[in-house]
Image: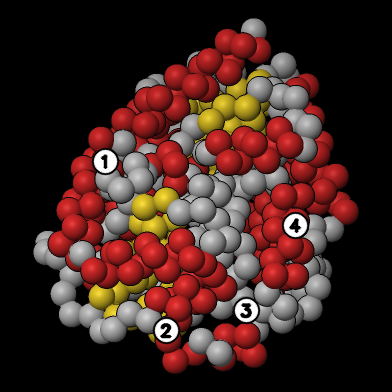
Amino acid sequence: MRVLVSHPHAAAVANAVARALDEGGALAAYVTGVASTPGSWRGALLGAAARIRPELRNRAVEVSPRRLRARWSVELLARVAASTGIVPGPRRAYDAMFVLHDAVVAALPWPAGTDAVYAYEDGALRTFRTARRHGLACLWDLPLPHWRQLERVWIEESARWPGAAGGTPSLEPGWKRRRKEEEVALADAAFVASDFTRASLEAEGCRKPIVVAPYGFPVEAFRPKARQADGPFTVLAVGTQDLRKGTPYLLEAWRRAGLRDARLRLVGPMRLTDAFVAQYRSGFEHVPHLPRAALEAEYQAADLLAFPTLGDGFGLVMQEAMCCGTPVLTTRCGGGPHCIDDGVDGMLVPERNVDALVEALRTAAADREGLARMGAAARRRAERESWGNVGRALQDRIAGALEGRA
């Protein structure tokens, strides 16, 4: 089995998939954007650039140098085209990267002996067409729930929280919908990280085999805290703060919980209106952006990570926090059930339930020592289910999908 992995901007999950396959001798090539292997001249260049842009540290990919096909010019060209307005649309940088990368990968010569291509939603169409012409298997990775489900979440939550989001929903344009549907049609199997995402595909009538492959924990990138958090009881929420992530429920629960000597810290862009947020403004701190490299200190300083999502493919921030020994409070609308045993190494609550969040927050604040024990259990779980261990299971699942095609 030899698999070509394609992703336009070296996302952490794609890097881990490529590394797992490489370690098992099954990686034909990893084609991506700006990336480098440690110890290379490009790695030195990225290291220097990371002093100005710390997020570039995420572009170090631990695969064999001869397997990495880093197309820096493709990603940079797409970003420039988007920033100059050549590519129209509200998410033009994202769209330009995926579409251009897909076209380039489809036109490249692929390593001899390649059996399958593993590509991601929005960046797989032309790659899959080329693979089909050569009789290769097409493995499609869906990082988020089905787009129709996400649209429904936006519409429903806009009605529940009037004025919170403002404007009209950001619906996927027709060309992207058609592109997604054709990618699914060409795929031999769909790979998802959670049962929640699998259910969203099945609800939309997907008849292709769906393989659930939960992500591994990034234990090498996020170290455990040296001691229990002290000072004010601190709850952290990381990611885009919007309707889908359940931010209104968290803000309302925090206000109702009325915790003393406590702080709520939101890290990530705020996608709720100023008018809506104003009623909660005195109750939380907000940091619009932090590079991934700076998140470790945030997780370590917190007592609890709150992630009340209403629709996620998985939720990497949960695993990052657990690696740091910080337990997570989340819902079942993502990867929570795959990485948390309720009451043991984290907490699961019903989605859209302010009362359940209030109770969980009060319980956590009243027993910080118990919460610390839960965090220690979270770290132990992370070590058991690291990418090194989960990667081998992923390789087995990919091999199984290829055997099913045969």
Q: Please name whichever residue, 350 or 373, is drawn nearer the observer in this view of the structure.
A: 350
- The local secondary structure at tag 1 comes to helix
Q: Residue at x 30, y 56 (%)?
A: 327
Q: Earlier in the sequence, mark 4 or mark 1?
A: 4
Earlier sequence position, callout 3 versus callout 1: 3
The reply to whether residue 39 is visible in this rendering is: no
4 or 2: tag closer to the N-terminus: 4
Q: Amino acid at mark 1?
A: Arg
- The reply, left or right, for residue 97 in relation to residue 64 is right
Residue at the extreme top: 406
Q: Give the spatial CA distance, label 3 vs label 4.
A: 16 Å
The residue tagged 2 is: 284
How far is the residue under mark 1 from the one under mark 2? 30 Å
Q: Going from the N terminus, do you reach mark 1 or mark 2 first?
A: 2
- Measure the C-alpha gap from mark 4 to mark 2: 28 Å
Q: Give the distance between the C-alpha atoms of the residues marked 3 and 1, in whole angstroms.
A: 34 Å
Query: Between 380 and 7, which is closer to the camera in this rendering?
Result: 380
Q: State the CA–CA distance, disc 4 to disc 1.
A: 34 Å
Q: Which residue is mark 4?
A: 151
